[in-house]
């Protein structure tokens, strides 16, 4: 079965430090990977997806098919990065649905 | 423009009652999704609509759950004979994607359902 694993429920780093949110997936086909973010009192929104290969708000994520990972990285964390981050898997057998990980709550300390 | 809207924002009901949750997608979005977020759980897919058809209902947890979409727009998720384990935040999302993979999904604010 398809699965997304985010091993860290909580992650706390200091402002200016590098941050990495881990995501591993289980899917034998061609995956589509996404990171969604939910800031406090806001709705869930797309942060980035692997096919666009772009940096959003300083975040990047590289799809590593060998390690089945899609870790989210930012070299210098900012306080406004504090949020709930969800890794999601799409493109499952042509289906439109997303399979989400459990999420990681990132807290950036001043 | 207006985003995805959901109503009600909060719903408290008694065990055994039926509830209806409504979703208004972004205008022109043909794809609509329902997800559920239970306490301590991630987001679980429930059902996907393309237009008024539901090609993927694989996430509906039991036959107490049903959904429909009319006019290619508004969708209603109905839970019959609610149980306490149905308590969750129900999220609706819409997308302009019609085929060829999973596009960006735009989420609503959710409906928090509490079953007493």
Image (cartoon, coloured by chain):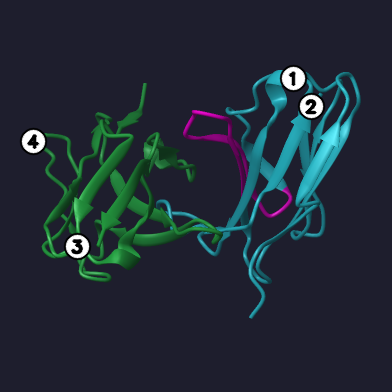
Residue A90, image quadrant: top left
The disc at residue B115 is 2
Quadrant that contains the C terminus of chain B: top right
Q: State the image coordinates of residue B102 (x, y, percent, origin top left).
A: 42, 52
In the rendered view, does B20 fall on the left or right side of A90? right
Q: Colour of chain A?
A: green
- Specify start and end residues of the magenta stretch as a single range: B33-52
| Front residue (pair B46, B115) | B115
**Chain letter for mark 3:** A
Above or below: residue A99 compared with residue A45: above
Q: Mark 1 touching mark 2, by CB under 8 A?
A: yes
Q: Mark 2 touching mark 4, by CB under 8 A?
A: no
**Chain letter for mark 2:** B
- For the colour cyan, the matching chain is B
Helix, strand or loop under label 1:
helix
Give the label, 2 or 3, closer to the camera.
Answer: 3
| Front residue (pair B72, A78) | A78
Q: Mark 1 touching mark 4, by CB under 8 A?
A: no
Which residue is tagged 3? A15
- Same-chain status of marks 1 and 2: yes
Q: Is residue B36 part of the magenta span, yes or no?
A: yes
Return the residue found at the far bottom.
B1
Q: State the image coordinates of residue B48 (x, y, percent, origin top left).
A: 61, 43
Which residue is tagged 1? B84
Residue B84, image quadrant: top right
Find the distance from the CA under tag 3 to the CA under tag 1.
41 Å
Above or below: residue A107 compared with residue A29: below
């Amino acid at each position: 079965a398809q699965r997304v694993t985010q091993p860290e429920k909580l992650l706390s780093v200091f402002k200016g430090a590098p941050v990495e949110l881990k995501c591993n997936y289980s899917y034998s086909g061609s995956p589509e990977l996404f990171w969604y973010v939910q800031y406090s009192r806001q709705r869930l929104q797309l942060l980035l997806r692997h096919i666009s290969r772009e940096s959003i708000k300083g975040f990047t994520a590289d799809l590593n098919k060998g390690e089945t990972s899609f870790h989210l990285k930012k070299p210098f964390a900012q306080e406004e990065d504090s949020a709930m981050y969800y890794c999601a898997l799409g493109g499952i057998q042509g289906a439109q649905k997303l399979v989400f990980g459990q999420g990681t709550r990132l807290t950036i300390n001043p | 423009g207006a985003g995805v809207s959901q109503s009600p924002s909060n719903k408290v009901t008694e065990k055994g009652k039926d509830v209806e949750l409504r979703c208004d997608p972004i205008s022109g979005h043909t794809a609509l999704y329902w997800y559920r977020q239970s306490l301590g759980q991630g987001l679980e897919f429930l059902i996907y609509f393309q237009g008024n058809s539901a090609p993927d209902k694989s996430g509906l947890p039991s036959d107490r759950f049903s959904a429909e979409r009319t006019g290619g727009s508004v969708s209603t998720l109905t839970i019959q004979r609610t149980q306490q384990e149905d308590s969750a935040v129900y999220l609706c999302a819409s997308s302009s994607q019609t085929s060829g993979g999973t596009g960006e999904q735009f989420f609503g604010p959710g409906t928090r359902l509490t079953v007493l």
